[in-house]
Image (cartoon, grey):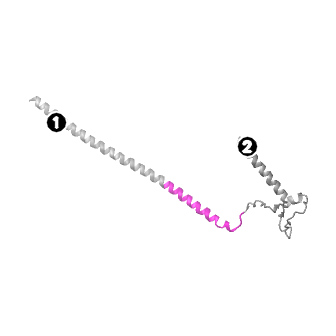
Amino acid sequence: MSEQKDLEKLQAKRSELEAESRSLKEEQKKLEYSIKILEEQVVIEELCEKNKTAKDAISNLEAKLTELESRMKPKPQSPPACPAPPPPAETNHEMITPPSEEMEQAPEPEPEVAEAAPEDPEESGVTVTAIDDEALVETQEAKGDKQQDKKKHRFF
């Protein structure tokens, strides 16, 4: 009978160890689950902190934007400090010449088209001068020759 008792003891010990193994596995699962929960909470807190920082930065930028916009509103009422001068306009019958260049140019023969001059020379620093048709034709021919030369070079 001693063998029977030994067998029963061993079976009881086995069942105890199996029960302990089950409880350890359950505890391990609970701890793993708790770890997952805590990891998620940490990630959530980090994201909340990043979002808060981003919201603060956005609110600061919006405040700066409104401040700059409020500064800009009074300025459009006054004229701009340094406007860009308009480019000189040329047409077939007239050319605008600055006063300094007008003094340097030699007097030309009277063209067919009448010259338009301002009534008061101090009032306007711009003089309109007519261009002879011959000079216009010469400049157009020169431009045409240059364009043909460029076309020839493109094929090489």
Q: Which residues are magenta?
A: 52-80
Q: Is residue 103 above or below residue 7?
A: below
Which quadrant of the figure has residue 130?
bottom right
Q: Is residue 56 magenta?
A: yes
Element under label 1?
helix
Residue 123, given in percent of the width and then of the height, sits at 83, 68
Toward the bottom, the furthest residue is 119
Q: Quadrant of the N terminus?
A: top left
Q: Amino acid at mark 2?
A: His
**Is the magenta region chiefly helix, strand or loop?**
helix
Q: Which mark is residue 153?
A: 2
Pick the residue in front: 62 or 146. Answer: 146
Q: Quadrant of the C terminus?
A: top right
Residue sitting at x 45%, y 51%: 47
Could you give the CA–CA distance between mark 2 and mark 1, rounded to whole angstroms? 104 Å
> Earlier along the polypeptide chain: callout 2 or callout 1?
1
Q: Nearer the viewer, mark 2 or mark 1?
A: 2
Element under label 2?
helix
Q: Amino acid at mark 1?
A: Ala
Q: Is residue 54 above or below residue 150?
A: below
Residue 145, given in percent of the width and then of the height, sits at 78, 49
Q: Which mark is residue 12?
A: 1
Pick the residue in front: 124 or 30. Answer: 124
Residue sitting at x 84%, y 56%: 135
Residue 17, given in percent of the width and then of the height, sits at 22, 36
